[in-house]
Image (spheres, rainbow, N blue to C red):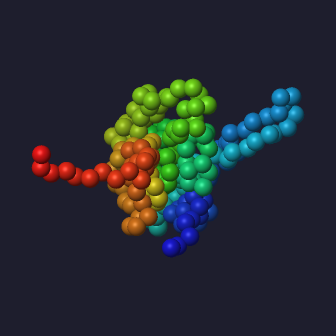
Amino acid sequence: MEEQLTSVQRIDLLLNSGSFREVGSLTSSVTYSDDATRITSFVPSNNFIGTGEIGVAPLVKKVVVLGDDFTVRGGHADGSVWAKSLWAEATALRLRIPMVRLLDGSSGGGSVKSYLEMGRTYVPPLTGFHTMVELLATVPVAAALLGPVVGLAAIKATVSHFAVMVDGNSQLFSAGPPIGSSLHLHSCTGS
């Protein structure tokens, strides 16, 4: 089995050399001490976003790219600042340039841990979905499913003009893998 690339490595392979301009590189979830004099915990964002160029002259095109990093809390909301992903979508729409989504995880979507900390779920409102739909009517949107793609990332995959999956590595779930997979269901026939 080949070693999985990080989001930064994937973006470097996708875009023209030296063209990527990251946005929100310092974005993270930070907890401070009670007196706010020191950082007690730090979780980096699991979404790398920015702009770059793709293609060869004379067909070079500027794009907005979003790359999930599955290594940070499996891409769930408690490992990221979800607004980064919304910014990427809104920027592609505002600038009217193509969107490329490198999906691996939940793309900043929810997790049980998030729901327990909030004491509620943020479903059914899906902040930013209207932007994703409007983006489809405005610019090309492509997605690459590079590993397990669940929840919000699954929505992003299906709300794209073109999506590809890595053979033998990608899975698409509307939610997490089945809970209780050790249970075996049997088909019954007869009376």
Can the viewer see residue 62? Answer: no
Is 77 located above or below residue 99 in the figure? above
Identified at 42% across, 53% down, the residue is 182
- In percent of width and height, residue 191 lies at 12, 46
Is 142 located above or below residue 128 in the figure? below
Left or right: where 102 falls relative to 27: left
- In percent of width and height, residue 184 lies at 34, 53
Identified at 83% across, 33% down, the residue is 33
Identified at 55% across, 44% down, the residue is 76
Q: Which of 127 and 135 lies nearest the eye of the viewer?
A: 127
Can the viewer see residue 112? Answer: yes
- In percent of width and height, residue 55 lies at 46, 64
Identified at 37% across, 36% down, the residue is 134
| Number of on-image labels | 0
Single out the residue that lies furthest toward the front: 191
Single out the residue that lies furthest toward the left: 190
Is 6 located above or below residue 132 in the figure? below
- In percent of width and height, residue 98 lies at 43, 50
Single out the residue that lies furthest toward the bottom: 1
